[in-house]
Image: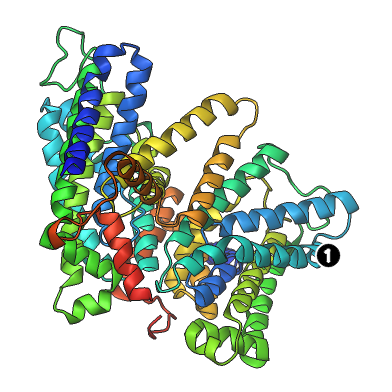
Amino acid sequence: MQRDTFKKYSLAALVALAFAFPLVVSNPTYVHILIMLYLFAYMTTCWNVVGGFAGVLPLGHSVFVGIGAYTSTVLWLQYGISPWLGMLVGGVIAAAVGYLIGKPTLKMRGAYFALSTMAFVEGVRVIVENVDKIGPFKLNGPRGLNIAPLPPEAAGFWSFQFDSKEPYYYIILIMLIAMVALTRFLSRSKLGYCLYAGGEEPEAAQALGVNVTRYKIIAMIISSFSIALAGTFLAQLTLFIYPKSVLTLDLSFELAFIALIGGRGSIAGPIIGSFLLRPVGEFSRIYLADSLPGMHLIIYGVILIVVMLYQPRGLTEPLTRLFDRLLDRLFGKETPPNGKPSAGNSSSSRSASTEVTSS
Amino acid sequence: MDFIFFLQDLINGVLMGLIYGLVALGLTLIFGVLKVINFAHGSFIMVGMFVAYWAVSLTGLHPYLALALVVPTMFIFGYFTQDLLIKPVFRAERDVREPTTVIIVTTGMWYILDNLALLIFGPDYRALSPNPLKGQMIELGQLFISVPKLWGALASVATAVGLFLFLSKTRLGRAVRATSLDREAAGLMGINQWKIYNIAFGLGTAVAGIAGVALTPFNNVYPTVGIPFDVKSFVIVVLGGLGSIPGALIGGVIIGLIESLGPIFMTSTWTEAIVYGLFLLVLFVRPTGLFGQKFDW
C-alpha cells in the first residue's frame, strides 16, 4: 500500500513540477524546448493509440497534423473563425480522413499498411504543393500560409495567439495530460484489450470473435482526431505552415521512432521516448551541424539501431524495472497483495503475455 | 510528327521504367525472402553509385567494368549487414510474422549511410568524369535512344532473368525459396535459415549495386541520391506485388511510362500525384499487387 501511495505522490510531484516550471524558469528558450518536447510527446501518444496498441506501423500520421494545421489556419485567415473552433473542425476532418484511409488499409498486412500510409502522406504533400486553392480555400501551394501576428493587446485566448510562451506551455501540457489519461483509459477498456489481442495474435483474436479491423479503425479515428489538434497548436505556435513542415515523411518517421525507442504500446513510452530522443537530436544538431554536417543524423541512426538491438521493446521497460528496484530498496520486496496480480504498467504485462505465447 | 514525339516518350518511359525495375529488384528480393521492407535500399543504391564512381574516377576504367568491383563489395556489405545488425533484432521478434522493429533498424541505416556519405564526400553533385557513355545516342530515323539507358534496361532484364534462373534452377536458390515460403519447415529440412537470410540480403544489396552502376553514367552522384529511388521502389514493388520479380519490372515500366507520358497531358509535377494515386488505387483494389502471390506469409 505504501508503495502505491509513493508511486501516486511521485507522479503528482512530477505533474506539479511541470506546472511550476515556467514560474521558476523564465528563459523563453527553455520554455520553448519543453513545449516542443510536450508537443512531440503528445503527438506520439496519439500515434501510439493505433501504432502501439494495434501493433501496426502507420508512417503517415503527419497527414493528420497537416489537416489540423491547414484547417484551422484557413478558417482563421479567410473567415476569422477562432483557431479553437478550427481545431475541432480540423480534428473532425482528420477523423473522417482517418476512417476513409483506415477502412481499406487496416485490413492489410503490416508491410502494405506501412507503405500505403507513406504513399498517402507523399501523395497529399504533392497535391498541396501543386494547388493554390482547393475550392474556396486558399492553400498557397509550396509557399504555405503565414498567420499575421496580432499586436500584443489583441492577442489572447480567442485568437490562440499569446505574446509570451507560457500560455502555449500550459495548453500543450494540459493537452498532453488529457491525452495520456485518455490512453490510460483506453488501454484498460474493451477497445484496448481487443487492440492488444489483435496486435499480438490476429488469428486467435478473430477466432474468439473479435472484429480486429473494426477496433483498429476506431483506434485510427481516435488517433487521427487527437493528433490533428496538435497540428493546430503547431500552426499557432509557429504562425507559419507550409507543406514541408507539416506534411512530411520526416515528421511521420520521427513519431514512429519516438514511440519505438520509448516503447510502443506502453503509456509512458511516448513521453520517455520524446524526452530521450528529441534533446539528443536537437543538441547534436545545434553543436555539430556546422562542423560535421550530417553528424547529428548519424548519431540519431546509431541510437535507433543500438536501442533496437539491445532493447527491441523500447526503453520504458528497463526504466520501469529500475524504478521498481528503487521501490524495492525503499519499501522492501513487493508481495502480491492478497492474491491479486500486481498492476504493472501495460508494457510489462504485455511482454509477459508474449513470453507465455512464445515459449 | 506528334506520333514521333509520342514514340520517343514511350521508348524513354520503357527504358527508364526497366531501370526503375532494376532499382526495385533488390528490394523485392529481400522482402520476398525476409518479409522485411528494407528502408535503407535507396542508401544501398547510393553506396553502389559511390563505389562505381570512385572505381571509375581513380582507375579510369570503363564504367561498366566497375561491376566487377561493385557486385562483390555490395554482396559482402549486405551479407554482414544482415548478419550483424538485422539478425539479432529478427531473432528477438522470431514469432512475429512481419517484424516491424527491423524497419526501424533499416531506417537507422539509411540515416547513417546517407549522412556518412555527406560527411565524407560533401553535398556536391558529382558526374562521372572519364565517361565514354556521356550523351551517346543511337539514332533510328528521327528517334534517339540513350545508350546508357539502353544498357541499364538490358542489365535490368538480364539481372531479373539471372535471379529467376538462380531461384528456380540452383540448389541454393531452391533453399532460398523454401525459406521464404516457410522458414520453420525449411529449418527442419536442414536449411540454415540465418545463412539463407544473409545470402538473400547480400544478393538484394548486390542487385542494388548493379542498379547503382547502371545509373552512374547518366545520373549525378550525391549523398541523398537514393531517397527518390527509395520511395519510387516502394511504389513499384507494391504495384507489382511485394516479392515478385516480374512484378518489379512491370511495376517499374508502369511508373516509367506515367512519368514520361504524363507530361503530355498535364504539368509534370502532377505526374507524381498520379503515381501515388495509382499506388493507392492498386492497394485498395488488389492489395497483393499485380503479380503478388496470394499465399499466406
Q: Residue at x 17, y 23 (%)?
A: A160
**Above or below A83: residue A303:** below
Q: Position of residue B83 (x, y in %)?
A: 63, 66
Which residue is denoted by mark 1 in the rendering?
B65
**Above or below B206: residue A179:** above
Q: Position of residue A334 (x, y in %)?
A: 26, 51
Lateral position of residue A288 relative to residue B67, left or right: left
Counting every numbered tag in the picture gives 1
Q: Residue at x 68, y 82 (%)?
A: B162
Quarter the C terminus of chain A occupies? bottom left
Residue A135 visible to an observer of this rendering: no
Lateral position of residue B76 relative to residue A253, left or right: right
**Above or below B220: residue A312:** below
Q: Residue at x 29, y 34 (%)?
A: A39
Residue A204 visible to an observer of this rendering: yes
Question: Which of the two residues, A59 or B288, is positioned nearer the viewer here?
Answer: A59
